[in-house]
Amino acid sequence: GGVKTDNANVAGQVDLLVGVVPAVNIEWIQKIHRDTSERPYTPEQVTEIILDRMQDYVEFITPQFDNTHINFHRIPLVDTSNPFSGQAVPSPEDSLVVTSVRIDGVDLQAVADQLPAEAMAFLQNDTTLVYKGSFMVDVMDIMLTPIIDGLMASK
């Protein structure tokens, strides 16, 4: 992560900081599903863990996304209003991704133009690209490959 506190500044030590984050309700649904299916927790125990970690989430985890160069933020297109109800994790097909870019040299229109029509990609503004969730890996490849190649060439 890109933590930045009075005692540490990881964000200042990296060439490229990328955030991948689902909407908070998706994140909680994923955690409940994972911890109850792969670990020996009940839904109630996972809910308690989420509550216990809320202060760290607010103070340390979410502020890191202010320091990233690029954020991939998954938004559900299905009802996730109660993440504690035991529902399934929304699939990529039931999601949109909002990708925000805070570095120069990324042409979001060119990225959108390289996606097929079924990605339904559009620019929300000069720094934000929106598209269907099932195309997130494609966008990462299109967007990040030239950035990483440039970083490697400059070393």
Image (cartoon, rainbow, N blue to C red):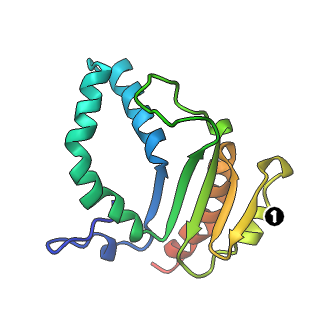
> Relative to 130, does residue 13 appear above or below in the rendering?
below
Q: Is 95 placed left or right of 50 in the picture? A: right
Q: Quarter of the image for the C terminus: give it.
A: bottom left
Q: Residue at x 40, y 37 (%)?
A: 28
Say whether residue 73 is left or right of residue 114.
left
User: Can you give x and y, in whole percent of width and height, for residue 144 in the image?
Assistant: 58, 63
Amino acid type, label 1 = Asp
Question: Up-down: is 12 above or below 54?
Answer: below
- In depth, the one of 1 and 29 nearer the eye is 29
Callout 1: SS: helix
10 relative position to 67: left or right? left
The residue where tag 1 is placed is 113
| Residue at image point 66% right, 37% down | 94
Figure check: 124 above or below 118? below
- The single residue placed furthest to the right in the displayed view is 117
In percent of the image, x 53 and y 76: which residue is there?
102
The image position of residue 126, as x and y in percent, is 67, 77
